[in-house]
Amino acid sequence: MKELQPLNENVLLDITEEEGQQTTASGIIIPDTAKEKPQYAKVVAIGNIENPGISVGDTVFYKKFSGTEFDFESKQYLMVPYADLLAKIVETEAI
């Protein structure tokens, strides 16, 4: 089995999308080319970063046009610089 390990201060994100067609409320099918990609993804691996504020398994929000997309073993990934991560998405309890 092969594994991707980010180098330097890079973070590997899993951006594999769920299969299935999306439709509007009136029944119009939205093609893949018209869908806007989300700007959040799950952290798969972290490069050599001192005191990262994230860990593997976290969901993060990243800059819109950041990183390099690629396919590896039938999954889609995004390699982004750590500096391009904007926030970590966390679950909180309602007050």
Image (cartoon, rainbow, N blue to C red):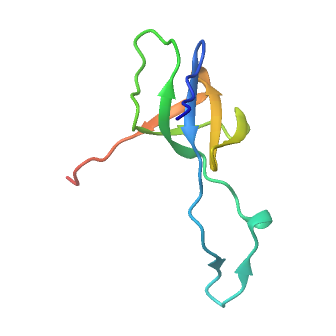
Residue 76 located left or right of residue 11: right
- Residue at position x 64%, y 29% in the image: 80
Provide residue 21's location: percent of width, then percent of height: 64, 76
Residue that protrudes farthest toward the front in the picture: 1
**Badge count:** 0
Instruction: Tell me: 89 left or right of 77.
Output: left
Q: Residue at x 67, y 54 (%)?
A: 37
Query: Hey, which residue is sitting farthest top in the picture?
Result: 50
Q: Observer-nearest residue: 78 or 27?
A: 78
Q: Is residue 64 above or below residue 85?
A: below
Instruction: Report the residue that reaches farthest toward the bottom.
Output: 26
Q: Quadrant of residue 57?
A: top left
User: Looking at the image, which is closer to me, 94 or 75?
Assistant: 75
Q: Is residue 59 above or below residue 80?
A: below
Residue 42 pos. (x, y %): 48, 42
Residue 14 falls in which quadrant of the image? top right
Q: Is residue 73 above or below residue 55?
A: below
Residue 6 point in image, percent of width and height: 58, 21
**Could you tell whether 25 is left or right of 94 in the image?**
right
**Residue appearing at x 54%, y 45% in the figure:** 40
Residue 8 position, x and y percent, is: 60, 12
Residue at 41 percent across and 27 percent down: it is 54
